[in-house]
Image (cartoon, coloured by chain):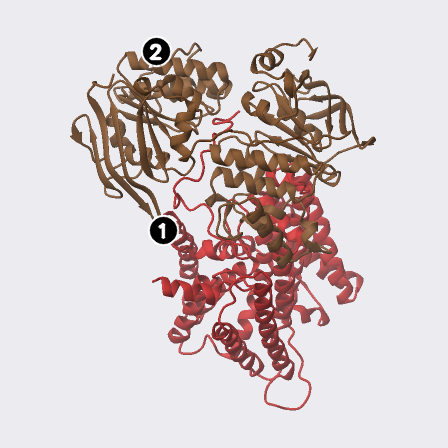
Chain colours: A brown, B red
Amino acid sequence: MSDAPVLLEMRSITKEFPGVKALSDVNLRVRRGEIHAICGENGAGKSTLMKVLSGVYPHGTYFGDIVYQGAESRFSDIRASEQAGIVIIHQELALVPGMSITENIFLGNEPRRYGAIDWKAAHRQALELMARVGLREDPDTLIKDIGVGKQQLVEIAKAFAKDVKLLILDEPTAALNEDDSQHLLDLLRGFKERGITSIMISHKLNEIAQVADAITILRDGHTIETLDVKAQGVDEDRIVRGMVGRELHSRFPDHTPKIGEVFFEVRDWTVRHPISTDRMVVKGSNFTVRRGEIVGFAGLMGAGRTELAMSVFGRSYGVYQSGRIFKDGREIVLRSVSDAIANGLAYVSEDRKSLGLNLLDDIKTSVVAAKLSKVATHGVLDQVREYRAAEQYRTSLRVKAPTVDEGVTKLSGGNQQKVVLAKWMFTDPDLLILDEPTRGIDVGAKYEIYNIIQQLADQGKGVIVISSELPELIGLCDRIYTVFEGTITGDIERRDADPELLMKQMTSAKKAQTP
Amino acid sequence: MSKIKDLQKSLFAGTTSNARQFGMIFALVAIVLLFQILTNGLTLNSGNLISLVSQYSYILILAIGMLMVIVAGHIDLSVGSIAAFVGIVVARVMQDWNVPWFVAILIGLGVGALIGAWQGFWVAYVGVPAFIVTLAGMMLFRGGNQFIGNADTIPVPQGFKVIGAGFLPEVGPDTGYNNLTLLLGLLVCVAVVVREWKARKTRREMDADVAPMWISLIRVAVPIAVVLYATLRFAGGRVGTSFPISGIILGVLVVIYAFITRNTAGGRHIYAVGGNARAAELSGVKLKRVNFLVIMNMSILAALAGMIFVARSAASGPQDGLGWELDAIAAVFIGGAAVSGGLGTVSGSIVGGLVMAVLNNGLQLMGVGSDRVQIIKGLVLLLAVAFDVYNKNRGRFSIIGSVSRPFRREAPAVPAPRVETGQEPAKTPVAR
């Protein structure tokens, strides 16, 4: 492998933004036909490096050289890099939902005949390209009617339509389920055999250890090292060590739970789909939470975990059908989000950018947003109280920002998540529902979030954690419910929890209690 | 460079006033001075200033309401028609039923509230976009005006004219100036000092750096100088004229609404809804109620503006309020609000409205025809916003961006000034 010719070499790349040196003397050397992973914590400079490579930041706005296919390249924009066969697929897919697969594949690159689009040729070529990426669909299907996994394949087909030589994938599996992820990784391996080189940015270290031939690790805008996976026998822990600059002994903090009485109970919870109201999204679900307990909800994508949580949280999802909620032995009726907040519930959404934060806000406005009454007298806000409340969370949760006047868009994912947590801790809830609390944030920040969750439980609060990462649930939770097709199929104590058992319960309708 | 920036920061930020309104205010001052020169001193003449205020106060009142509508992420095209409709209703009840003028004003506000409730219902509870609802309202109430007034003009009685054409009365000893206007000016000066003092106190309680005393002195001295100059101008006009009543109504509304939008939970909710409606809802904000009240409030202010206009022109007619909605919207956008909602301030919109007013007035004084005035106003609106967008894209200081932040917040979402703003995997990369 390592004697293959070098396809791309980025030498001493330095990129500065006003006040920040995003990349400092970064080197990257990618050999022809390999899968090269780039790892690093959020803010390490991975995306910036890829933007330099693909011409988003044109030649002249950075220092250093890019040598591609043996010649120095000076891309002036994305088109120039695409013409050279470098195609980048961003984590936010660039597809038009209302257009068909064919139309999307050839968007901006339509096969023409006498000036008009040659749809026959487009159709034929689309079928070929789809076969190459293993996508079995009618090419006339609209993008919005296929799943995220298949959309990702359309993006790759689109890259092939441009005669790609170097494929760059930014977090390609972040939104995919296990099956789709696996398919994508197999596909990358297949490309390798056909001589296509891939660069892959990912937070999923197990996938990287699985498919990558070489790994370049960035930290704080510097190249730390390049690892040869096969020769050096690289595993996940080795990558983590390079990324954070220290060995993480445990990915989960030590914790002795102090579990009390059952204080929150949901019985026979059934919710219909908001639009197709004959469909039950949540069916007869029962669960309980004890004081001081961290309860996990495991399930595949689309199992109805988020829907269950949001419908309990003041009916913020779907149409309520039936079910009762008890808190401290008393039945409560939560018709709206403000009812839920008043009754001590908090829901931290899985999508913090579109559901959790107002991106125009600064830290302090965000922190107090869910309970303005705590910093107001007769509806008039007290700036000093607001500031002090926010400042207290900024220091106690160690949000990396100079002041609470900092806009939330300027924060990294992990710090944004801390702000959202602070927002809900500020409402002083008894039950916190955390939906994918560590999605898209880096290893160090995850550890801190776990710490916060455990502290909240130790204060006697109940915490529900919804997560797609089984190791996270097993490492963090005292008890785990499995959810399958809107129904709770398992109630598993921590000591019994292992990935195989969970996966079995997550994929079968049969309800089985732990022995 | 950074020294200038620091100075700018400490002079214009860090008070309870909005951060760095510097740019817009500077533009306003420049326009005023430019016309002062071009018109050989006519612009800052007492008579002109007085007519400027009474001529534009109703547009500025609309701009206050429009700011809140736009911040919440809507638009209101019906305000001109509502103003005309309420104007004719009020003129009619005074003429036909001999209703006293102060009762008529209450009726007018009531009609405005009813219209607002009607439009708010469709927007907030049925979910019809405000653009459509108010476009319908624009036709509906324009027609209503002509239906009630038989497409004719109806005069209003003397007492009613006070709100549009009235001035502070002459009382007390003969000082050569209008005494009440002098008093008003003094009160404003005291308010400026008190505000700065309170701002310093707040800063101290937040353990933030308090600006050196000389900066506070400048921040107090400059506005006071402007206020004193204006006071003498307004008080020293032709006998019988002084600061217009409509200007006082405007001033009171600005103070009230600036307070509401900046310092109350309700105001905060408007920004939250405009910034991210779904996130606001999941934070317990009652989305429908906020939308309803914002739309309703706009109609009430439109009713008030309509009555002030009728009082000023002494009669209500079928052509009243034509195109007002566009003037109000222009003022709000020049004043820095974002088209997508969530950004903007009342004071910014007032400054934006004043820029348009002074421009209009100055060009008229110079004898420029209304055709060319329109062209120039259109270009100014376009260039003001384009300049700002350009600067924002280049990651530079943005006038509008800086004006448009409610209470001291840092620039939002300037493209990639930071390394990476996080590696969020998009949950639904493509529409679902």
Query: Which mark lies nearer to you, 2 or 1?
Result: 1
Quarter holding the C terminus of chain A? top right
Amino acid type shown at disc 2: Arg
Decide which of tag 2 and tag 1 comes sooner along the chain.
1
Q: Nearer the viewer, residue A510 or B7?
A: A510
Label 2 is found on which chain of the structure? A
Q: Is residue B80 visible?
A: no
The spot of residue A73 in percent (x, y) is 20, 33
Q: Is residue A96 left or right of residue A464?
A: left
Q: Nearer the viewer, residue A178 or B251?
A: A178
The spot of residue A408 in percent (x, y) is 51, 45
Residue at 62% in and 59% down: A384
Q: Is residue A331 above or below residue B296?
A: above
Q: Extreme right residue here?
A: A330
Amino acid type shown at disc 1: Gly
Quarter holding the N terminus of chain A? top left
Determine which residue is flagged by label 1: A19
Image quarter of residue B292: top right
Image quarter of residue A238: top left
Q: Which numbered dot is residue A132? A: 2
Residue at 35% in and 16% down: A188
Q: Extreme bottom residue here?
A: B174
Does dot 1 land on a helix, a strand or a loop? loop
Q: Is residue B52 visible?
A: yes
Residue at 67% in and 24% down: A308
